Image (tube, rainbow, N blue to C red):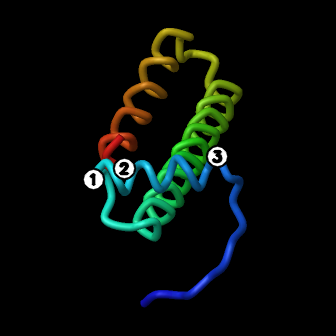
Amino acid sequence: MSVKASASITEQQDDFARRLVADGHYPSLRAVVQRGLELVRAEIECEEFEQAALRAFLEERAKSPSISHEEGCRRVEATLKKKRRALGL
């Protein structure tokens, strides 16, 4: 389902978006804006996931000092890699 929305952009943003369409990167200005929003969404989801993973790591560290720093980092990195793959990043 589509929702019609209106937004103002700078002349530089408009020039850039129109150049992307003219160069054949996107079929329309609408497609440029939609892709931009999808990139912002993916970036924010990734940041939120990384923050949640860090909080979980810190909570686990606080409860169990038997986990080495290296092991904790390995676990966080493994979790982040898994999520990035799932998001296609």
Q: Residue at the location (43% across, 49% down)?
A: 19
Q: Quadrant of residue 85?
A: top left
Residue 28 in picture, x, y percent from top left: 38, 67
Residue 50 in picture, x, y percent from top left: 56, 38
For the residue labelled by badge 3, is the local secondary structure a helix, a strand or a loop? helix
Task: Quote the CA–CA distance across marks 3 and 1.
Answer: 18 Å
Q: Against 16, is 59 above or below?
A: above
Q: Residue at the location (42% across, 19% down)?
A: 74
Circle on res. 24:
1
Write down the residue under mark 2: 87
Q: Label 1: how many residues lie within 10 Å, few (<14), some (14-19) or many (20+)? A: few
Q: Quadrant of residue 49?
A: top right
Closest to the observer, 74 or 26: 26
Q: Residue at the location (36% across, 50% down)?
A: 87
Write down the residue under mark 3: 12
Closest to the observer, 2 or 41: 2
For the residue labelled by badge 1, is the local secondary structure a helix, a strand or a loop? loop
Q: Nearer the viewer, mark 3 or mark 2?
A: 3
Horizontal relation, residue 15 to residue 79: left or right: right
Mark 2–mark 1 CB contact (< 8 Å): no
Closest to the observer, 19 or 75: 19
Closest to the observer, 38 or 16: 16
Q: Amino acid at mark 3?
A: Gln
Q: Earlier in the sequence, mark 2 or mark 1?
A: 1
Q: Amino acid at mark 1?
A: Gly
Task: Quote the CA–CA distance across marks 3 and 2.
Answer: 30 Å
* Quarter the C terminus occupies: top left
Task: Quote the CA–CA distance across marks 2 and 1.
Answer: 26 Å
Q: Amino acid at mark 2?
A: Leu
